[in-house]
Image (tube, rainbow, N blue to C red):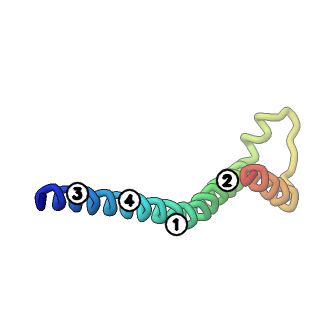
Amino acid sequence: MLAAYLMVLGIFNSVTLVSANNSLRGVIHERALKLLKPIGRAEMEREIQKTVKKISEDKEIAEISSEESFEFDENGLKRYLKQVITEIKK
């Protein structure tokens, strides 16, 4: 009788620990996502800005890709970059 009681008590304790472990894992996952999501977004924005800057500095590639040469307007380029970032966030 005592062995059966100890066995049930052991199973109960195991279930309790597994349940607490799953809850803890869920909380850690939520907190990690809240932390990592903005970091990932900022990194993506930085990469986009770096790419756009490289393209704007290399006018020769832009002239080859279009038959007419054109000047990059810095304000227009910034507006376009903001528009791209807004689309990515959606």
- The number of numbered discs placed on residues in the rendered structure image is 4
Three-letter amino acid code of the residue under disc 3: Val
Closer to the chain start, of discs 2 and 4, is 4
CA separation in Å, label 1 and label 4: 19 Å
Closer to the chain start, of discs 2 and 3, is 3
Q: Choose mark 2 or mark 4, whichever is in front.
A: 4
CA separation in Å, label 4 and label 3: 16 Å
Q: Which residue is mark 3?
A: 8
Please tell me whether residue 61 is drawn above or below residue 45 in the rendered image: above
Under circle 4, the secondary element is helix
Q: Position of residue 30 (x, y in %)?
A: 53, 62
Q: Nearer the viewer, residue 76 or 38?
A: 38
Q: Choose mark 2 or mark 1, whichever is in front.
A: 1
Q: Which residue is mark 2?
A: 48
- State yes or no: discs 3 and 1 in contact (Cβ < 8 Å): no
CA separation in Å, label 2 and label 1: 27 Å
In-image side of 21 versus 86 (left or right): left
In-image side of 3 versus 10 (left or right): left
Disc number placed over residue 19 in the picture, else none:
4
- Neighbourhood count class around disc 4 (C-alpha, 10 Å): few under 14, some 14–19, many 20 upward: few
